[in-house]
Amino acid sequence: MEGIWLALGLGDSPSGSGPTLLVWLVIGSATLLAAHLVSVLLQQLRIGRIRDKRSKLSAAAAAWGDSDRIPVTIVTGFLGAGKTTLLNALLRCKDSRICVIENEVGSVGLDHDLLRGATEGFAKDVFVLANGCVCCSAGSGGTGGELERVLDLVLDIALATREAGEPPVDHVVIETSGLADPAPLVELFFTAGGADDSSASPSRAFELRGVVTVADAKNILRHLPGDVAAAAGRRTDPADSELSSAWLAGSGAAVEAGRQVAFADRIWLNKVDLVGAEAVAEAERAIARVNPMAELTRCVQAVPLGETREKDGPPTRGQVALLSAARSAWTAPPAAARLAACGHSHGSAKEAAGCEQCAGEAAPHSHSATEARTLRARGAVLRPALEAWLARLVSDGDRWHRLYRIKGAVRLLESDAAPGDDPAWAVIQGVHSEVHVEPWPEGAAPPDDGAGSGFVVLIGRRISDAELAGLQEGLDACMAGL
Ligand SMILES: Nc1nc2c(ncn2[C@@H]2O[C@H](COP(=O)(O)OP(=O)(O)OP(=O)(O)O)[C@@H](O)[C@H]2O)c(=O)[nH]1
């Protein structure tokens, strides 16, 4: 044993302690190795199970007739444009069974709670993608991205309901996060649904009906690349070729907003109540420069102008028509344009030039330095203090420019609350300088944030740690009793 001790380079074995230490070293290494082997084995078993399931679903999808395909609509649009408002209306379509696949940005999700509130009493299914970015999780190959697994699940439900003779799934609506690039999603369905598709992947059971982009009439010019916006207004008018090359190169603060408009079949120009006629026309010109093919509809609360919708009533005829857009209404963009529009982070000039990853569907990428940061509520907050803090938050310096979206769920006490009163959950909704505290939707479950006391998610650019710490202090100061 002394010899081994010396061979290990540990010097002389202190009498009595050397062999014991060595034994512990050997036991420790063996335990680590065993744990690693068990984890690899479990992972392999899991992959095996997923592959098994996928091949069963693939076989079912291959036998699925063209007319049986489940229609899919992708609803996209920049942060705060009104996607959830539109979905809440669509989910009240009593006569059809709609599956919603919901994807959110931020470490704590909120939209699905709000959607669940809307689905109370209706036969709907809402799936939430745990991964922060639907465009990064789609089509990652192997056992499939997260979206594909959710589609597997929807297909499974569709097969089971069909066998049981229950009402079939009529439509799948995928709501992307406000920061998603819809291109990989569109490609997932485009490559899996065509008549020439021989891959028989489960996504063949779905048929993309269209991409609906909700645009915020008040803020779209801020989000589209500056040169596109400028060309739509009265300031400059660069030649079309210059404009499109600048846009395709990914200039501007939020290149995703440009892509969302670019991929649309239909554009819901929402929130026209917040701006004048000239600003609406300017927004429409900017949109048309990016995507002159899309059908454009002016809306308030995601309801087309000229239609009325009762609160909590069924969707309007125009809203329902969104779901029935024919597949022929859209075409995949030319590959060259997709590559040029990439704007992803590349590790090398070679990658950037060829960008094969970006031509694929699962390349992780940066979001123009846009990020979601979370503040934690450490207890119930007082409404007047919260409202004053929110007003300061969006009026301090240039912050409102950098903050695209504020979303939160807090437990709120009114100013006249008496000791012992229970706080009520409330929603914080903010888009740039506009921020409101709204009642929690009736029937919606409280958010599951782990701590149960609420949170505020800030989505924007250049939110430093120091700034975040200052904002956390501000929120802490809103706590009742502090
Ligand atoms: N004034 C006005 N407000 C609207 C309109 N449509 C929606 N809103 C409000 O705008 C805020 C954002 O709407 P959402 O439907 O949550 O937007 P979203 O696109 O789902 O937002 P993200 O999930 O952050 O991407 C909410 O407070 C809505 O009530 C509208 O037409 N006019």
Image (cartoon, helix red, strand yellow):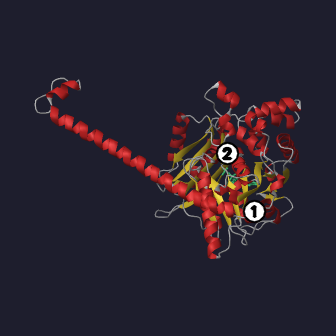
Q: Is any part of residue 199 visible from this angle?
A: yes
Q: Whole-percent x and y of residue 173?
A: 70, 59
Indicate which disc, 1 or 2, sits on the residue closer to the N terminus: 1
Residue furthest toward the bottom?
A: 165
Q: Nearer the viewer, residue 236 or 424?
A: 236
The residue at the point 72 percent across, 62 percent down is 69
Relative vertical location of residue 442 with respect to residue 265 in this rendering, above or below: below
Q: Whole-percent x and y of residue 241?
A: 86, 31
Q: Mark 2 highlights which residue?
A: 180
Q: Mark 1 highlights which residue?
A: 66
Residue type indicated by callout 1:
Asp
Q: Whole-percent x and y of residue 424?
A: 55, 62
Q: Nearer the viewer, residue 468 or 129?
A: 129
Q: Secondary structure at mark 1?
A: helix
C-alpha separation, residue under disc 1 versus residue under disc 2: 29 Å
Residue type indicated by callout 2:
Ala
Q: For this view, does 201 lie left or right of residue 194?
A: left
